[in-house]
Image (spheres, rainbow, N blue to C red):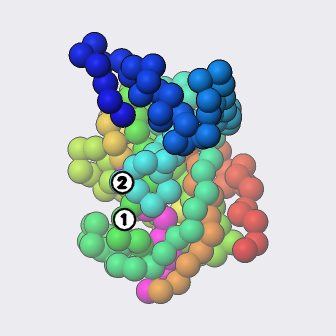
Amino acid sequence: MWMSGNRRPSALASLIACSAAFGCTAKEAPAPPAAPIEAPPEKPNPYQDSSSRFGTVPLHAGFSPDPRVVAGEALGEVKAKSVHRKCRGWIATTPDYLLDADTAFFQLYVLGRSASDVTLVVRRPDGSVLCNDNRSGTKDPMVRGNFPSGTTQVWVGVQAEGETASYRLGFSEVKWKSSSIALPEPG
């Protein structure tokens, strides 16, 4: 479309463009296109867009609800020993979750809950590793300890290569029993 020196279309150029595109005359102009209807914004998901399989769990001292519970599917892709020589079982190549703590925790409990026999591997921001296969004769692994602020990697693993298992993963500042977390729905 021809533009005059002030960068606005001339009346003649507008009429020619209107006529060519919409069959308009000088007395009628096309209706402007309807504005697209925007969906209401979705509630932000804090567990998306992370370098983990299922997302990031943001926590700070005194968080609520306690326990904070998330869910996932454990994969047996690599030996858990690849993270630490004392860890058992098989885990995914990428952490299942990242725990993003903006405050340090004097005592934090991390518990895996599954109908299958799962393992737990946790690498804290300082590089130290906690792992547990079975806690007190149950199939539900748990680790506890002080956690500095920063990003902690969490894997829930299985007993054998190639296995999978649905699980729930809980974080708490208070001691609780594995039965505090419901088992995952059968898949």
Residue drawn 40% across and 56% down? 52
Q: Inspect this view and state whether residue 65 appears.
A: no
- As helix, strand or loop, the secondary structure at mark 2 comes to loop
Residue drawn 44% across and 24% down? 12
Residue drawn 71% across and 63% down? 184
Q: Quadrant of residue 140?
A: bottom right
Q: Give residue 129's position: percent from left, percent from top.
A: 31, 56
Q: Give residue 23's position: percent from left, percent from top.
A: 61, 40
Q: Inspect this view and state whether residue 22 appears.
A: yes
Residue drawn 62% across and 64% down? 167
Residue 94, numbered circle = 1
Q: Quadrant of residue 171?
A: top right
158 magenta-colored:
yes
Q: Residues within 10 Å of mark 2 (few under 14, many from 20)?
A: some
Q: From mark 1 to mark 2, how far is it between C-alphas?
A: 8 Å
95 magenta-colored:
no
Mark 1–mark 2 contact, CB under 8 Å?
yes
Q: Which residue is mark 2?
A: 51
Vertical order, 87 against 42 (above or below): below
- As helix, strand or loop, the secondary structure at mark 1 comes to loop
Vertical order, 153 against 91 (above or below): above
Instruction: Please tell me which residue lies in front, 53 or 37.
Output: 37
The amino acid type of the residue labelled 2 equals Ser
Q: Which residues are magenta?
A: 153-161
The amino acid type of the residue labelled 1 equals Thr
Quarter of the image that includes the C terminus: bottom right
Q: Give residue 123's position: percent from left, percent from top.
A: 33, 54
Vertical order, 147 against 155 (above or below): above
Between tags 1 and 2, which lies in front? 2
Quarter of the image that includes the N terminus: top left
